[in-house]
Image (cartoon, rainbow, N blue to C red):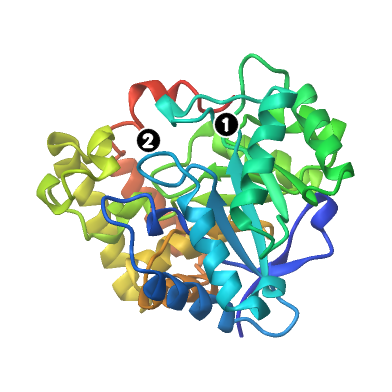
Amino acid sequence: MVATTTLGGTASHITVGKVAHGLMMMTWRPVPIPDEEAFEAIKAGIDTLPPGVKMLLNSGAFYANDGSTANLEMLARFYAKYPEYAEKTFLSVKGACKPGLEDLQIDCSPEGLRRSVDEVIRALNGTKKLDLFQPARIDPRVSVEDTVKALAQLVTEGKFDHIGLSECSANTLRRGNSVHPISIVEIEVSPTSYEEETKKVIATAAELGITVAGYSPLGRGLLTGSITKPEDLHPDDMRNHYTRFQEENLRHNVAIADALKSIAAKKGCTAAQLCIGWVGSLGDKVIPLPGSSSKKRVLENLAGGDVILTEAEKQEIERVLEEHPVKGDRYGEKVELALWG
């Protein structure tokens, strides 16, 4: 039986799979994968769900090396080829970035939000209604109240149906929700990205009935054990810029992956499934959001939603993290400044 949950806010009537599907790495990579491979991976996840349950797909208006709408254009080709899958998916898209993607500069002015939403709609080319839009980060120059007010106006105009926020603090989430119900808040959640503010956002979302989409539950591949040295990454891989993947820190962090892999082996699941199960255990409306580009990986990740951890297993994971606290930041220095807005 596939695990499911309901979304929050104005989308509380919508049932989705407990594990979502992030599409970023289909196009934001040195060489985007072929359409046929991407389409097979997307279909595989959707096909595991029972009738009436939607797959939460997560895309971005800048998910490409050049900051273009390549990911959305790929999705438009998918929906054009398989139109019957449009109603089987709930499409969440991040945007509000200034053109060019330089250091992820955010523009949440009314004009910037409208420009970004219209760009998303153009890229989808009528193949799929935009279900939820969220600014990729909080714009420090615009209050969250004004941001949500502008987004609510776009909802009224019928451009999309639901509002999300991303990488915001618990206080910002509460303030934004007071203007218009927030359906999804997207934050990074994994055994190695579980900060005090992460816990506060999850608690506040539970109180307000908001879904948490926990992205990078596998620590960007770090926790699967597939990356043990810098040479395992393509020279143009964005993770080369993240301090957790730089040589000295990576040598330390591999010990975390090895310990989690050992726990997973005893559990009878993969390390990826263990991490996904752990994220999903943090709340009924906490949805792990792993990114995957292959059918095999998608199916492995979705099975993680069925992994139920005992209290003893959770404590064992906590002990691993206490003994081997992760070294390095989540992002590069400039992007770190945009977190928890």
Quadrant including the N terminus: bottom right
Rendering coords of residue 264 (x, y %): 34, 69
- Residue 333 or residue 112, whichever sits in front: 112
Residue 224 lies left or right of residue 286; in this view the side is: left
Q: For the residues marked 2 and 1, what is the alpha-carbon distance in whole angstroms?
A: 15 Å
Residue 256 lies left or right of residue 26; in this view the side is: left
Count neighbours of disc 2 (C-alpha within 10 A) and say few if under 14, some if 14 to 19, many if 20 or more.
Answer: many
Query: Of the numbered discs in the image, which one, if any, rests on residue 23?
Result: none
**Residue on which disc 2 sits:** 330
- Against 219, is 137 above or below? above
**Residue on which disc 1 sits:** 137
Residue 154 lies left or right of residue 5; in this view the side is: right
Element on which disc 1 rests:
loop
Count neighbours of disc 1 (C-alpha within 10 A) and say few if under 14, some if 14 to 19, many if 20 or more.
Answer: many
Q: Residue at x 68, y 45 (%)?
A: 133
**First in residue order: circle 2 vs circle 1:** 1
- Against 255, is 325 above or below? above
- Residue 193 or residue 159, whichever sits in front: 159
Q: Residue at x 85, y 32 (%)?
A: 178
Q: Amino acid at mark 2?
A: Arg
Rendering coords of residue 15 (x, y %): 74, 69
- Residue 70 or residue 288, whichever sits in front: 70
- Against 273, is 321 above or below? above
Element on which disc 2 rests:
loop
- Residue 158 or residue 329, whichever sits in front: 158
Q: Amino acid at mark 1?
A: Arg
In the picture, residue 182 is in which quadrant? Answer: top right
Quadrant including the C terminus: top right
Can residue 182 be seen? yes
> Count the marks: how many?
2
Q: Residue at x 37, y 39 (%)?
A: 66
Rendering coords of residue 118 (x, y %): 68, 42
